[in-house]
């Protein structure tokens, strides 16, 4: 998406947000927002006031919320940069975008599966301890001197 389109979204919605307001809405720090901009993670340039203050559109906020979820789910920064670059390029590279997202989804699915296995072991161990404590027989559980 071009900077012009981003500007148009902001003007149409009538919403222009400061960096502090965007930080509050996205959960990103002001420092992180500047980093995202510097690293090319946004799909359009951030507008500036005549005094040089950043002004974000609702489109910018929506994009940042997606970025937050992709990063929270472990998407590598390099992949997020590539995804943003593809979106900036516009139509015609949707297959590449899909490939990036599909790869990430498979990685997240594998993480979820591994965590579910961990949860099963933890739940079993909680049950063992709860059962022993309920019977008053907690002594000897993982006792290295036994």
Image: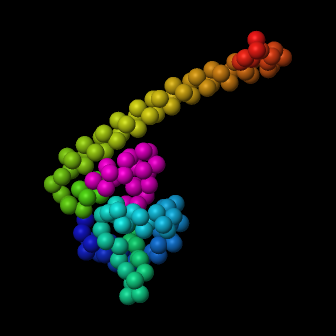
Depth check: 140 or 19 in front? 140
Q: Is residue 90 left or right of residue 36?
A: left
The image shows residue 109 at horizontal and vertical percentages of 40, 34
Q: If the image is split into quadrants, where does the N terminus sit? A: bottom left
Looking at the image, can residue 61 be seen?
no
Q: Is residue 132 left or right of residue 85?
A: right
Depth check: 34 or 54 in front? 34
Residue found at the very far bottom of the displayed protein: 50
Q: Please tell me whether residue 75 belongs to the stretch shown in magenta.
A: yes
For residue 5, above or below residue 50: above
Identify the residue at horizontal 20%, vertical 46% (top origin): 95
Magenta stretch bounds:
61-82
For residue 17, above or below residue 75: below
The image shows residue 38 at horizontal and vertical percentages of 36, 66
Where is residue 2, by image quadrant?
Answer: bottom left
Q: If the image is split into quadrants, where does the C terminus sit? A: top right
The image shows residue 37 at horizontal and vertical percentages of 37, 66
Looking at the image, can residue 30 be seen?
yes
Identify the residue at horizontal 29%, vertical 75% (top origin): 8
């Amino acid at each position: 998406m071009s900077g012009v389109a981003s500007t148009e979204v902001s003007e149409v919605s009538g919403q222009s947000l400061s960096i502090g307001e965007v930080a509050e809405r996205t959960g990103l720090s002001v420092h992180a927002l500047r980093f995202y901009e510097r690293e090319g993670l946004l799909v359009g340039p951030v507008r500036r006031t005549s005094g040089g203050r950043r002004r974000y559109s609702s489109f910018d906020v929506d994009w940042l919320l997606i970025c937050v979820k992709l990063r929270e789910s472990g998407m590598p920064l390099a992949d997020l940069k590539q995804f943003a670059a593809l979106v900036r390029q516009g139509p015609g590279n949707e297959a590449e975008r899909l490939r990036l997202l599909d790869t990430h989804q498979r990685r997240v699915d594998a993480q979820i599966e591994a965590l579910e296995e961990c949860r099963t072991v933890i739940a079993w161990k909680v049950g063992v301890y709860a059962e022993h404590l309920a019977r008053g027989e907690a002594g000897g559980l993982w006792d290295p001197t036994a």
